[in-house]
Image (spheres, rainbow, N blue to C red):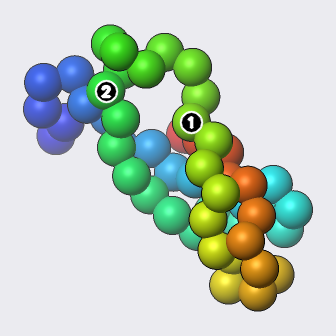
């Protein structure tokens, strides 16, 4: 169970649509969706990953 307003989120690759990473964020301070540039194993390059549920 999440503690103190933090929620576990999943990051999805924008190119291949695979869900590669999971992380957490504070829902009170970060209301917009997270976008990070991470390495995608399926594309074998760095791509933008967006938050999904």
Residue 42 in the image: state x and y as whole percent. Answer: 75, 84
Number of residues whose C-alpha sits closer than 10 Å to that of mark 1, classed few (under 14), some (14–19) or many (20 or more) = some
As drawn, the residue found furthest toward the left would be: 3
Q: Residue 37 vs residue 32: left or right?
A: right
- As drawn, the label of residue 34 is 1
Q: Position of residue 24 (x, y in %)?
A: 34, 43
> Do callouts 1 and 2 mark residues in contact (Cβ within 8 Å)?
no
Q: Which residue is drawn at 87% across and 62% down?
A: 15
- List x then y, in percent, for residue 1: 16, 40
Query: Is 6 rendered above or below residue 36?
Result: above
| Most foreground residue, 49 or 52 | 49
* Near-viewer residue (18 or 14): 14
Element marked by disc 2: strand
In the rendered image, residue 26, in percent from the top left (x then y), is placed at: 31, 26
Choose top left, top right, bottom left or bottom right for residue 40. bottom right
Q: Reading the chain from its start, which is encountered first: label 1 or label 2?
A: 2
Q: In this view, does 43 lie above or below 6?
A: below
When the figure is inspected, residue 44 is found, relative to residue 16, above or below; the finding is: below
Q: Quadrant of the C terminus?
A: top right
What residue is shown with label 2? 26
């Amino acid at each position: 169970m999440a503690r103190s307003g933090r929620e576990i989120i999943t990051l999805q690759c924008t190119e291949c649509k695979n869900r590669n990473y999971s992380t957490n964020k504070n829902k009170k301070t970060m209301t917009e969706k997270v976008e990070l540039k991470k390495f995608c194993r399926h594309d074998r390059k760095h791509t933008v990953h967006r938050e999904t549920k």
